[in-house]
Structures are given as structure tokens and as C-alpha cells.
Image: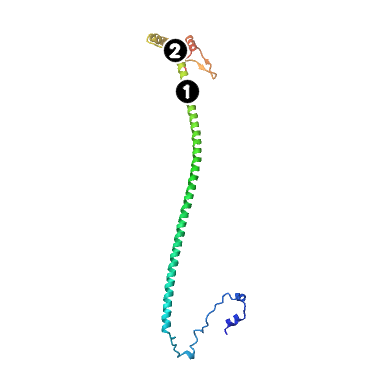
Amino acid sequence: MSLISKTLSLHETASRLVCFPALTFVRWRKPRHLPKARSKIFVVRQPTPIDPTEETLMKTHTHHYSTEMRALRSHLHKVMSEINQQKKSKGLAEGKLEKEKEWAKMIKQNERWNINIAKKREARQAEEAAARLAEINRIKSVQEQRAIRRHQEASERVAYELDQVDSFITESNADEVIDRVLDSTENYLFAVDPKGNVLGAETEQDTDSNSMGPSVPPT
């Protein structure tokens, strides 16, 4: 009895076999370096005799078994192919239905977003329109005030010019005005202090001319 057989004979219960996790059952073989036994040196093994009837029957049974197993495998392969095709078709249909539901959900969400954005856009456009209208009214009021001021300034200028009609130089009094200008003299021998007072002698003609003041129309 070998060492493994003796070891196994000591353990009767199956629970005790847990202590041999790496146990492997193999046929005992003698080492390669040992020579062939003397009793087997010149022994020639004779083939096992075969019964022809038994051989024919076994071949027939083997052929039948192979045919039946091949048919069974073919049938199972066909059945599994049909089942897989049905699962695939069902999965595609469910996936398509799921995609359609998801698409409809996204369309509804997009419509809600469009409605919200449209409301915000309308409110913003209304505010912009109101601001633009207010700016237009402000510009119109400024332009109207500017036009009124210009009209008032023009009216004042026209009134001033109408008051100064008598002092205009025309063809009838041009010679007289030229003679008066030529006869008049100006005295520039005077000084002005920091307060604006004129210091120096002035002639009577200068006094008259100063009293008249410059005739500058208003601007």
C-alpha cells in the first residue's frame, strides 16, 4: 500500500479530507531512470481479439448515436437561433419604443422651454420698446425746446434789427456817414486800472462816443 493510500485510510469522514487541498489522484509510475523489468524485456503484447459481429454492431450503434447527436445539436442550434432572434427583435422593438418615448419627452420639454423663452423675450422686447419710446419722446422734447429757443432768439434778433433800422447805412445817407467818420477823431491816450476804470483826459467828442456805447447786436 502506498503512502497516499495509507494516509487516506486514516481519514474516514469526508470532512477530514479538507486538510488535503492540493491532493491529486494519479496512477503510480516508476521513475524514468529505472530500467525495464526482466519479466517484460522480451514480452510482445498480443492485440485483444475482436469479435466481428460485435464490431459491426458497435459501429452501427456509433453511427446511430453520432447521427442522433448531430440532429439534436442542429435542432437545438436552430431553436436557440430562433429564441435569440425573437429576443433581438423584442429588444429592438422595446428599444425603439423607449427611444420614441424619450423623443416625445424631449419634444414636450423643448416646447415648455420655448414657451418660457418666448415669454421672457416678449417681456424684454416690451421693456426695450418702452425705453426706446421714452428716448424718442425725450429727443423730441429736446428738439422742440431747441426749436423754440432758436425761434425766440431769431425773434429777438429781428426785433433788435427793426429797432436799429434808423441807424442803418443806406445809399441815401452813405455820404453823410462817411463825412462824419472822417471828421471824428479818437484819442487813445488813456489807461485802465485793474478795476476797469479809465484814467486819462478825454475830449468831449470821446465822451459823447463813449456815452453812446458800442452798437453790437445780441447774439
Residue 97 visible to the viewer: yes
Q: Residue at x 45, y 59 (%)?
A: 86
In the image, 112 versus 187, the foreground residue is: 112
Residue type, mark 1 in image: Glu
Which residue is disc 2 drawn over?
A: 162
- Residue 14: percent from the left, percent from the top? 61, 76
- Residue 137: percent from the left, percent from the top? 49, 27
Q: Residue at x 44, y 12 (%)?
A: 162
- Please state the total of marks drawn on the protein image: 2
Q: Establish if 172 lies above or below 128.
A: above
Report the mark closest to the observer, 1 or 2: 1
Identify the element where label 2 is drawn. helix
In the image, 109 versus 134, the foreground residue is: 109
- Residue 46: percent from the left, percent from the top? 44, 88
3D distance between C-alphas at marks 1 and 2: 27 Å
Residue type, mark 2 in image: Leu
Q: Is residue 208 left or right of residue 21?
A: left
Q: Establish if 18 lies above or below 88.
A: below
In the image, 10 versus 51, the foreground residue is: 51
Residue 219 visible to the viewer: no
Q: Which mark is residue 144?
A: 1
- Residue 10: percent from the left, percent from the top? 62, 81
The N terminus appears in which quarter of the rendering? bottom right
Q: Residue at x 42, y 70 (%)?
A: 71
Furthest residue to the left? 171
Q: Is residue 66 left or right of residue 196?
A: left
